Image: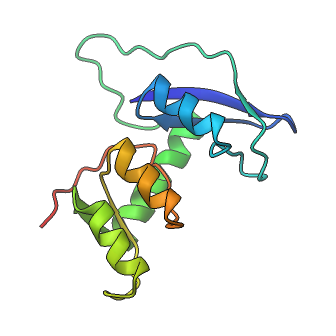
Amino acid sequence: MIRYALRCAAGHDFESWFASADAYDALAAKGLVSCGCGSTDVTKALMAPKVAAKGNRLSTPTTPIETRIAELRAKVEAEASYVGPRFAEEARRIHASETPETPIYGEANLAEAKALIDDGIAVAPLPFRPRAKAN
């Protein structure tokens, strides 16, 4: 996983996580990286990496973006079901109305995520790794 500081053409700064630098490049080339304002004219901004000292793990959010990610994690974990590596399969079943529409989250590789998007199934990467294990 790699985190990039991004800036849209309207001057909004934001951050997002990507599976790899190549994943970012592929998504950006297709116009799939967008700002909250809707702009897909997005570029990487300068960013200094945050490195914790050995054994010194950050336990509480220290920046506004970390606070927002922590809030998003809490909301997702409270309101959605973790389906683990079955994410692509479950998303397709919901899209096809084979199962009730319910919020889910899990894991999908780049090919699975691209196939879902190509088939018109809306998915988005989360900026954190799940803590839960699928049932």
Question: Which residue is rendered at x = 32% and y = 87% of the image?
Answer: 98
The quarter of the picture where residue 52 lies is top left
- Is residue 130 placed above or below 4 in the rendered structure? below
Left or right of 7 on screen, residue 26:
left
- Is residue 120 placed above or below 70 in the rendered structure? below
Q: Foreground: 55 or 135?
A: 135
Residue furthest to the left in view is 135
Left or right of 43 on screen, residue 17:
left
Quadrant of the rendering where the C terminus is positioned: bottom left
Is residue 24 among the parts visible in the rendering?
A: yes
Is residue 62 among the parts visible in the rendering?
A: no
- x, y percent for residue 67: 52, 44
Question: Which residue is rendered at x = 33% and y = 11% of the image?
Answer: 53
- x, y percent for residue 130: 29, 50
Asked which colour scheme the image uses, the reply is rainbow
- x, y percent for residue 93: 32, 78
- Is residue 87 placed above or below 3 in the rendered structure? below
